[in-house]
Amino acid sequence: MSPTESHSSTPIQIPRAVIFGCAGSRLEAAEHDFFRASNPLGFIVFARNCAAPEQLSQLVTDLRAAVGRADAPVLIDQEGGRVIRMGAPHWREPPAAGNIGALAERDRAAGCRAAWLNARLIAADLRHVGIDVCCLPVLDLQFAGVSSVVGDRAFSADADIVSELGRAAAEGLLAGGVLPVIKHMPGHGRSTADSHHAMPRVEASLEALMESDFRPFRALRDMPIGLSAHVCYEAFDADLPGTLSPTAIAEAVRGAIGFAGLLLSDDLSMEALSGSLGERARAALAAGCDLALHCNGEPGEMADVAENVTQLSPEGLRRWAIVKEIINEDYVFNYNELHDEFNKLMEVTLKP
């Protein structure tokens, strides 16, 4: 049976190794049928999907119903700053990570507390609408004279600060019942091109990468989910971007960094990758990613991806089973009190 056939029978039990986006603020009948047939592990939502709390909650419910799994993960990039999917007037808009990093440079303990509070508040907003995975913290480092694609999305140029704030942010999400995703593995900060538009190349030696870029990822290698970078690391593979390179994934992500969790590709639609969407998906899984990510909700592209991805591998299933056990359901807290505490801490960064 083709994964693109429309029918209403029960989906296959083992999900396909893919995360899909959808087109708009409601799930259309054709999308429902496609997801029912293709059975992706989960979904990701963007600003185009987030109109209001009740609407978004219904969309999340409908996405899970389409695949017949209440535990299907629903992801979002709610980093803050330039990367906000749930915004005003309905939701709090978090600051850029770089602002929290600036606080940490003045007062490390205050910065860590702010990172935890910010993530805890994000988690509350996400759980309220049923979203259970957030693609943060960004563990890339800030570098001068490179592409602005990372910039203030990163906490700092200091690997120790990034490690400590990244840990605090991840723990804040977990405390609120949301799974963190560390990104962009094994490091995007040094790249001179934006991987949305071209394939960046990193010429740094393994020694240099171990001393800087890899350190935050090594410090948080126990996190449940990681997201790859579409960056060519010449120390590992001079030809392929990390997402599609078996060498980079085996020797950098799994080896040098020691990450053993569920590995998600970055968005397959980004122009750092070449080939058809199906070819990209197939290559990402063959390289060692557990899941392929396709975000834009375009039907033809999704059909191509679905035709080219397999069910979750036994190792992917094992990792996903571990991930599901991590979610904390005890997340009662006072939102307003933590929001006020966070704002008072961040006032320091506005003072000269």
Image: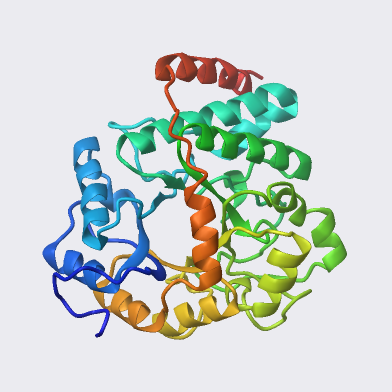
30 vs 139, left or right, is left
Q: Residue 28, how many percent across, how many down? A: 14, 61
Residue visible at 29% across and 66% down in the picture: 297
Residue visible at 62% across and 45% down in the picture: 154
Residue visible at 37% across and 45% down in the picture: 85
Residue 184 visible in the snapshot: yes
Q: Identify the coloring.
A: rainbow
Residue positioned most to the right: 207
Q: In the picture, which quadrant includes the C terminus?
A: top right
Q: Nearer the viewer, residue 341 or 309?
A: 309
Q: Residue 227, how many percent across, how many down? A: 56, 59
Image-quadrant location for residue 269: bottom left
Residue 30, above or below 52: below
Residue visible at 56% across and 64% down in the picture: 194
270 vs 209, left or right, is left
Q: Count all numbered tags in the image, as a single digit.
A: 0
Q: Nearer the viewer, residue 13 or 50?
A: 13
Q: Residue 86, how many percent across, how many down? A: 34, 41
Q: In the picture, which quadrant includes the N terminus?
A: bottom left
Residue 3, above or below 352: below
Q: Nearer the viewer, residue 290 or 293?
A: 290
Residue 51 visible in the snapshot: no
126 vs 264, left or right, is left
Residue 337, above or below 318: above
